[in-house]
């Protein structure tokens, strides 16, 4: 199903806006990726201009950067603790940017957008 990313047809008063343009394909959006924890599953999506995005549908690996030691390592995702996008996402184990995840090396905050580039990157949080 298509997602319409345009302004509302109604004014705050309740009357209709006049149409200043027809519907265009460029004004359409897509459903959210909702990246979950599981074996890696990435979908390739064609975008405007023939470019591509990688949408991570499932991901169990995260690249965590430790800012104190200045090193990055690859580790496994165990759980989503907090997700500021929606409290329901934390229950469903949905990974989005800003989510606090539990890994084998400790807690981390996601800095990438897995629904846009297919990779989960995070920064280690001090406990």
Image (cartoon, rainbow, N blue to C red):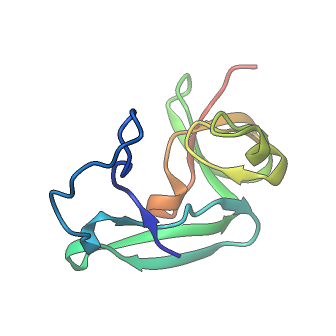
Q: Nearer the viewer, residue 113 or 68?
A: 113
- The x, y position of residue 56, in whole percent, is 57, 67
Q: Is residue 21 above or below residue 124?
A: below
Dividing the picture into quadrants, the one containing residue 48 is bottom left
Q: Residue at x 27, y 48 (%)?
A: 17
Q: Residue at x 51, y 40 (%)?
A: 111
123 with respect to 17 (left or right): right
Dividing the picture into quadrants, the one containing residue 88 is top right
- The x, y position of residue 64, in whole percent, is 60, 43
Q: Is residue 17 above or below residue 49?
A: above
Q: Nearer the viewer, residue 23 or 65?
A: 23
Q: Residue at x 69, y 20 (%)?
A: 126
18 with respect to 113 (left or right): left
Q: Residue at x 47, y 67 (%)?
A: 30
- The x, y position of residue 35, in whole percent, is 64, 60
- Tally the marks: 0
Residue 104 in sight: no
Residue 33 in sight: yes
Dividing the picture into quadrants, the one containing residue 80 is top right
Q: Quadrant of the C terminus?
A: top right
Q: Is residue 13 above or below residue 25?
A: above
- The x, y position of residue 63, in whole percent, is 58, 50
């Amino acid at each position: 199903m298509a997602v319409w990313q345009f302004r509302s047809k109604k004014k705050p008063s309740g009357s209709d806006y006049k149409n200043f343009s027809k519907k265009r394909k460029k004004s359409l959006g897509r459903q959210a990726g909702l990246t979950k924890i599981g074996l890696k599953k990435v979908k390739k999506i064609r975008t405007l201009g023939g470019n591509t995005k990688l949408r991570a549908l499932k991901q169990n690996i995260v690249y965590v950067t430790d800012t104190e030691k200045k090193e990055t390592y690859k580790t496994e995702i165990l759980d989503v603790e907090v997700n500021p996008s929606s409290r329901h996402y934390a229950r469903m184990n949905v990974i989005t940017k800003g989510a606090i995840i539990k890994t084998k090396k400790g807690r981390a905050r996601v800095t990438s957008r897995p629904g846009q580039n297919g990779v989960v990157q995070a920064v280690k949080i001090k406990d």
